[in-house]
Amino acid sequence: MSGRLSGRTAIVTGAGSGIGAEIARHLVREGASVVVADLDAERAAGVARSLEASGATVLACKVDISDEESVVDLVEVADQTFGAVDILCNNAAITSHDHLSRDLDVINLELDVWRKTLEVNLTGTMLCCKHVIPLMIRGGRGSIINISSGASLAGDRVLTSYGISKVGVNLLTKSVATQYGHQGVRSNCLCLGPTITATSPEGVEAFVHSQYDPVLLTPYLGRGEDIAAAAVFLASDDSRYITGQIISVDGGLLAHQPTVVFDPPIPAELPGT
């Protein structure tokens, strides 16, 4: 632990499992006090207990980021407990298989799926920013890390509302950076590619890698710690001159055009050349 975040307090939403839990662990290792916030109170408490066992200062909180009163309560508890919020990691989003399996192409997309996705992924992220930023301005500094997705950077055959909600998160990132930068608040966004975490189901890594191997530029999938390391960098003063940026952490997934293999080979002279 280098202590890059000693004396700072972070709120991480969706920290009861997966990437959010890994980000919370890495922030703690760097010396931050962390509010582990999640819709599932038991999961949040479990992560908090595991961090406390290492001597960390943590607080578990239940939050529904789509409910403004719930967000207000979360921020007030963090402020009353720690006296500041210096880091906000907006990681919470709808990721349940049942919901995502209904997020289809535009013609077949049910309106309730569209509305719920935007209500949580986009409105929820905005609400957390809305109520944390005043505390950051009061303290003279703050770093917001929004977790977005490669789904926001290219179209897909399905996941219409998910991808569009993350497009909104990308622009929200830049809007916050623009509006509050002179008051010491930085805002950046991580667009994730396929990532495996400690809570991923057994066997899923091999399957996912087999699907993405032809298009990734790395010989491996991302892991939770890869995302957490990027989040810690953006939370720390190491990135003090970086704001308003959308950073892909995706193994180069969208850095290139699809590779086309011609069989038989392309003729030496193509028509019209």
Image: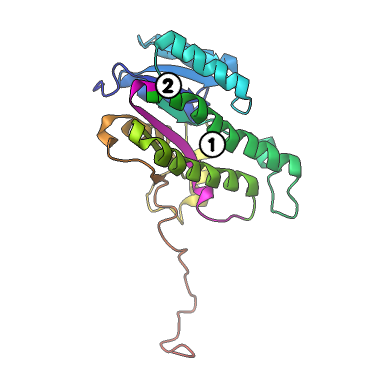
Quarter holding the C terminus is bottom left
| Image coordinates for residue 38, horizontal then vertical, percent | 55, 21
In terms of secondary structure, where does tag 1 sit?
loop
Magenta-colored stretch includes residue 17: no
Mark before the other along the chain sequence, 1 or 2: 2
Kind of residue sitting beneath label 1: Gly
Foreground tag (1 vs 2) = 2
Quarter holding the N terminus is top left
In the image, residue 39 sits, relative to residue 113, either above or below, namely: above
Question: What residue do we see at 58% from left, 47% from top?
Answer: 163
Q: Which residues are magenta?
A: 138-156
Magenta-colored stretch includes residue 142: yes
In the image, residue 101 sits, relative to residue 84, either above or below, namely: below
In the image, residue 256 sits, relative to residue 178, either above or below, namely: below
| Image coordinates for residue 203, horizontal then vertical, percent | 53, 36
Q: Quadrant of residue 34?
A: top left
CA distance for labels 1 and 2: 43 Å
Q: Is residue 229 visible?
A: no
| Image coordinates for residue 197, horizontal then vertical, percent | 47, 32
Q: Which residue is mark 1?
A: 203
Nearer-the-camera pick, 239 or 30: 239
Question: What residue do we see at 54% from left, 38% from top?
Answer: 204
Which mark identifies residue 135?
A: 2
Nearer-the-camera pick, 173 or 42: 173
| Image coordinates for residue 120, horizontal then vertical, percent | 61, 33
